[in-house]
Image: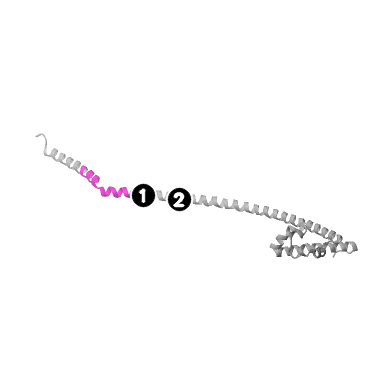
Amino acid sequence: MTDRTPADLRRQIEQTRHRLGVTVEELAVRADLRGRTRARAADLMDRAGAVGVQLRSTASMAGYRIQKRANRAGHTVQGRAGRAGHVIQEHAGRAGHTVRNTAARAGHAAQGRAVHARRAGHGLRGAASRRPQAVAGGAAQSVPAPVRAPVPFAQRYPRPAVVVGAAVAALVAAGAIGRNRARSGVKPR
């Protein structure tokens, strides 16, 4: 041990101090829980912020896609509804023509029956005078069979019955006038 000089001892002391300082710094860093906790919290907050931005971006894109699909679906439904409306309108027009033609045929048939009944002497006045109980609302058996079915409807809904009766009467009158003009050779206006 004597072979060491004071300079060697000083150098060894400096090295030992230096190593001890490094060890103390490492221990201080490890012992600094508050600082490590703050650093870890800052790191986690950075990560959470990045995840939040990513989630907002993803939600925005999903919202855009959903809105786009909803718009497409709305246009599809609107187009189908328009086509269905046109089809219904077309069917309603055809049904209207069918009803009009059926009503015209029924009017002509009623007109023919009325002319036939008048010729046979069984007009409405004759039937009413022979069967006053039917006109006054008497027994249903005294009402002719073709008239029996509409009677409950006419009793329940008198206004539409009057309108239908007036329309039938107008058709009968128009037919009679037309036939009279045709017989006499007068041209229609």
Q: Residue at x 70, y 60 (%)?
A: 153
- The residue nearer to you, when weighing 166 against 147, is 147
Task: Residue lying at the far right in this picture: please name it.
Answer: 184
- Pick the quarter of the image with the N terminus: top left
- The residue nearer to you, when weighing 45 against 27, is 45
- The residue nearer to you, when weighing 124 against 140, is 140
| Dot 2 crowding, Cα within 10 Å, few <14, some 14–19, many 20+ | few
Disc 1 residue type? Answer: Asp
**Residue 185 placed where, x, y %?**
90, 63
Left or right, 139 with reference to 175: left
Q: Residue at x 44, y 51 (%)?
A: 56
Q: Kindly report the secondary structure that dominates the magenta region of the rendered protein.
A: helix
21 inside magenta stretch: no
Tag 1, which secondary structure? Answer: helix
Q: Residue at x 71, y 60 (%)?
A: 152
- Residue 160 placement: quadrant: bottom right
Residue numbers of the magenta segment? 23-42
Q: Which residue is mark 2?
A: 57
Q: Which residue is mark 1?
A: 46
Left or right, 23 with reference to 53: left
**Residue 124 placed where, x, y %?**
81, 63
36 inside magenta stretch: yes
Left or right, 4 with reference to 150: left
Q: CA distance from mark 1 to mark 2?
A: 17 Å
- The residue nearer to you, when weighing 37 against 99, is 99
Q: How is the image coloured?
A: one colour
